[in-house]
Image: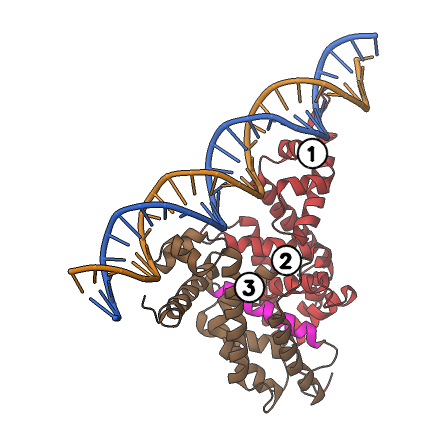
Chain colours: A red, B brown, C orange, D blue
DNA sequence: CCCACATGAGACATTCTTGTCTCATGACGG
DNA sequence: CCGTCATGAGACAAGAATGTCTCATGTGGG
């Protein structure tokens, strides 16, 4: 690295490595540092120079996932218009990150007692606020708590990502399946 | 142990060990053989005598989970009456096994390419058949595939189990939250 | 009373992964 | 042309978990 330093090369590489790690761990959540490095096309030494250890890598992926979710939330304008439409926009924006989200969602279950990343708390609050807003406007039913609807959104995203990756669901139906089930449920309605 | 042997003690112990292993792995999916043994109140040596290795233990848990699901399916009489009611009964029956199910569901994601247990395939088929029946009778919408609804059921069970274990959802609401969301979705309806 | 046998405790080798280190190489800028 | 520096390759130790083994113990039945 030149004296110009931290801005020019490391940043770019780091992000590329992170992306490829996300893609790999999405498919194989137990991949070793060696596999992550190979997948990124770099050596394990270089991987270790950019991420102090596996923990650091996972925490970086966590930050990436949170950032992508927040970006999706921004792009979906969660506070604008009908909550139902905002949710649809949100899931659509979230689709590319679904695999990473599924990985992080299950990864988080491993830390039983430990405190969770505050970023998740912020995101949870933001999503729960959307559901709460929908309840306030009368769009959403009030007998399902915002916390549960938030959790269910994560769960359905993960299920959807896995179902697609195993070929049980067509990837083009991903967004539709999730939003329709989450919003309308599986029961058939008389009128539209 | 007497000469009568394999039938009298081993079977009982094995099942007790399995139950306690399920309870532990439900909370901490990365628990060591040593921790599993301690949780069961036996030594690691004995644990190894009953289950050849960790793989064997997990496979036994898989068989247990499948058996419990099938038993729940039987008890819920999936083929009787309105599919909607059958699904409610099924989730209610499934509730005690939700934690184990969540563990097995995520565990299954680790085996990317490998063939999955045929027991799961049978169970999947049985659940999918319920949704298909509901579609045939006009109870369920036909734009959500039975395969996806089946996957969503697993996902919501897992999400529900985690949400309860982390205190985000009251355990008494477990069944209600899952069935109501899966059947009716989050949108508020004009008429009941 | 004695024997069989399951058990617990623990030693042991093995394997896998991680984290650290060194060194040679090659690119890039001055 | 030369020096700097990131990189790749690989050696290395440390730690964790697994699987196997032996041996002493105690219980329960004959």
Give the vertical position of B80 relative to B167 (above or below). Answer: below
Q: For marks 3 and 2, give the CA distance.
A: 11 Å
Of labels 3 and 2, earlier in sequence is 3
Residue B76 placement (x, y as % from top left): 53, 84
At label 2, counting other C-alpha atoms closer than 10 Å, the crowd grade (few under 14, some 14-19, many 20 or more) is some
Q: For marks 3 and 1, give the CA distance.
A: 34 Å
Residues drawn in magenta: B146-164
Classify mark 3: helix, strand or loop: helix
Asked if the stretch drawn in magenta spans residue B149, the answer is yes
Q: Which residue corresponds to the image point at 63% horizontal and 47% vertical from the top-left?
A: A31
Front in this rendered view, residue C11 or A47 = C11
Give the vertical position of B56 relative to A187 (above or below). Answer: above
Q: Mark 3 and 1 residues: CB-CB less than 8 Å, in contact?
A: no
Q: Are marks 3 and 1 on the same chain?
A: no
Q: Nearer the viewer, mark 3 or mark 2?
A: 2
Classify mark 2: helix, strand or loop: loop
Q: Which residue is mark 2?
A: B111
Q: Which residue corresponds to the image point at 39% horizontal and 53% vertical from the top-left?
A: B45
Query: Chain under label 2?
Result: B
Query: Chain under label 3?
Result: B
Is A55 situated left or right of A86 in this image? left
Residue B63 placement (x, y as % from top left): 53, 69
Residue A95 placement (x, y as % from top left): 72, 59
At label 3, counting other C-alpha atoms closer than 10 Å, the crowd grade (few under 14, some 14-19, many 20 or more) is many
Quadrant in which the C terminus of chain B is drawn:
bottom right
Instruction: Examine the residues drawn in magenta and state their main secondary structure.
Output: helix
- Residue ranking furthest to the bottom: B81
Q: Which residue is mark 1?
A: A43
Q: Which residue is mark 3?
A: B104
Asked if the stretch drawn in magenta spans residue A171, the answer is no
Q: Which residue corresponds to the image point at 63% horizontal and 31% vertical from the top-left?
A: A49
């Amino acid at each position: 690295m030149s004296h110009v330093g931290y801005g020019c090369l490391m940043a770019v590489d780091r992000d590329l490595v992170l992306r490829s790690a996300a893609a790999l761990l999405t498919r194989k959540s137990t991949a070793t540092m060696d596999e992550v490095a190979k997948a990124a096309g770099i050596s394990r030494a270089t991987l270790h120079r950019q991420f102090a250890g596996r923990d650091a890598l996972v925490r970086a992926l966590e930050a990436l996932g949170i950032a992508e979710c927040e970006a999706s939330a921004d792009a979906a304008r969660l506070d604008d218009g009908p909550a139902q439409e905002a949710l649809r926009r949100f899931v659509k924006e979230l689709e590319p990150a679904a695999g990473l989200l599924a990985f992080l969602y299950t990864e988080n279950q491993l830390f039983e007692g430990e405190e969770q990343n505050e970023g998740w708390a912020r995101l949870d609050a933001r999503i729960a606020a959307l559901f709460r807003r929908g309840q306030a406007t009368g769009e959403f039913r009030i007998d399902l708590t915002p916390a549960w609807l938030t959790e269910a959104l994560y769960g359905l995203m993960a299920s959807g990502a896995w179902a697609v990756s195993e070929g049980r669901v067509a990837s083009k139906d991903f967004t539709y399946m999730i939003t329709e089930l989450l919003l309308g449920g599986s029961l058939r309605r008389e009128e539209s």
